[in-house]
Image (tube, grey):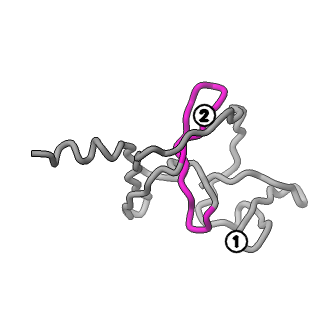
Amino acid sequence: MTRQVLAWDDEQPMVLGTSGLVRAWQLDGFEGLRDDNSMMIGAVPGGGWLIDCADAEGNTWTTPILAWTVHADGTARPITPDRDGVTTDATEGLAEYRIYHLDESEAGLRP
């Protein structure tokens, strides 16, 4: 899960939780801080792309990609909403994932 640090309190990063600002380490799945120097310069709709996800415990699920963020370094990141409705990098914290377009998944099913 990726969340933007909105404030600092006693040298602790504060992020938006379900009931306001909380210390980042209090959220489930917190892995640490990362310096994201690549500025986001745009976003485009998800356009029928899906992500098959698997976590470290072996749970699997499929989620539609809401949008792609485009960054100054030329990368694009898939964005999905989390259970709180906050959008995050879809690949963050996953053990494995597969990104594909809806048309690709149907291609093998056509007669």
Numbered range of the magenta stretch: 67-85
* Residue 35 at x, y percent in the picture: 72, 39
* Residue 42 at x, y percent in the picture: 65, 35
Is residue 25 placed above or below 92 in the rendered structure?
below
Residue at the bottom extreme, as displayed: 19
Q: Is residue 97 magenta?
A: no
- Local packing at callout 2 (Cα closer than 10 Å; few below 14, some 14-19, many 20+) is some
Query: SS of the residue at dot 1?
Result: loop
Residue at the top extreme, as displayed: 73
The residue carrying mark 1 is: 18
Residue 14 lies in what quarter of the image?
bottom right
Amino acid type at circle 1 is Thr
Query: SS of the residue at dot 2?
Result: strand
Amino acid type at circle 2 is Val
Give the residue at x 14% y 46%. Answer: 110
The foreground one among 17 and 58 is 17
The residue carrying mark 2 is: 70
Using residue 102 as the reference point, say whether residue 93 is left or right of it.
right
Q: Is residue 71 magenta?
A: yes
Residue 37 lies in what quarter of the image?
top right
